Image: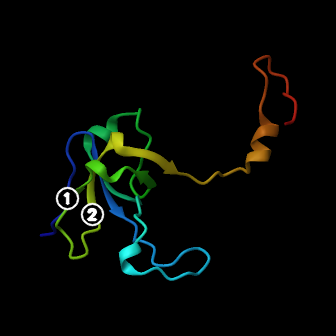
């Protein structure tokens, strides 16, 4: 039998990304100066969120969340799992299929005519 965590209500389960130990410029940070990381991947979504079209999140989406109300789950030794209220998810990282410049050129006016290129 496999154990798993199922969030209830308007909550999701997030695996928090590892904290950075090095800056983008290559400076190694001491452990006391750890930069708090508030991004992670959605591991599980409650049934209530899954059915609610107001929250366009899916399993494995990378999200940015406010950690204040995140509840750590003592399920793994490294404690990277958190149950987070959906209201604390402030952004979802998405990849555009079409480059932004190309999307702008494809816009149409409500009259059906091509709009001006931006």
Residue 111 is tagged as none
Instruction: Relative to 118, say whether 5 is above or below.
Output: below
Determine the residue positioned at 40% across, 64% down: 36
Determine the residue positioned at 43% across, 68% down: 35
Question: Mark 1, mark 2: which one is toward the viewer?
Answer: 2
Instruction: Relative to 79, say whether 52 is above or below.
Output: above
Determine the residue positioned at 75% across, 19% down: 110
Classify residue 107 as left or right of residue 80. right
Name the residue beneath numbered marker 2: 81
Q: Is residue 40 visible?
A: yes
**Rendering coords of residue 102 (x, y %):** 79, 45
**Rendering coords of residue 76 (x, y %):** 21, 72
**Rendering coords of residue 47 (x, y %):** 26, 42
86 and 25: which one is in front? 25
Quarter of the image for residue 95 reads bottom right
Q: Residues within 10 Å of mark 1 (few under 14, many from 20)?
A: some
Screen quadrant of the N terminus: bottom left
Marks 1 and 2, how far apart in space? 10 Å
Name the residue beneath numbered marker 1: 5
**Rendering coords of residue 72 (x, y %):** 22, 60
Quarter of the image for residue 48 reads top left
Determine the residue positioned at 44% across, 44% down: 90
Could you tell me which secondary element the residue under label 1 belongs to? loop
37 and 63: which one is in front? 37
Circles 1, 2 touching at the beta carbon (< 8 Å): yes
N-terminal of the two: label 1 or label 2? Answer: 1
Could you tell me which secondary element the residue under label 2 belongs to? strand
Which residue lies most toward the left here?
1
């Amino acid at each position: 039998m496999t154990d798993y965590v199922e969030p209830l209500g308007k909550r999701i389960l997030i695996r928090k990304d590892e904290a950075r130990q090095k800056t983008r410029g290559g400076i190694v940070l001491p452990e006391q100066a750890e930069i708090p990381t508030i991004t992670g991947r959605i591991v599980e979504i409650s049934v209530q969120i899954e059915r609610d079209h107001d929250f366009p999140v899916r399993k494995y989406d990378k999200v940015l969340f406010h950690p204040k109300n995140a509840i750590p789950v003592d399920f793994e030794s490294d404690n990277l799992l958190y149950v987070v209220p959906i209201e604390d998810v402030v952004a979802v990282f998405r990849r555009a299929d079409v480059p932004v410049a190309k999307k702008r050129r494809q816009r149409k006016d409500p009259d059906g005519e091509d709009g001006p290129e931006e």
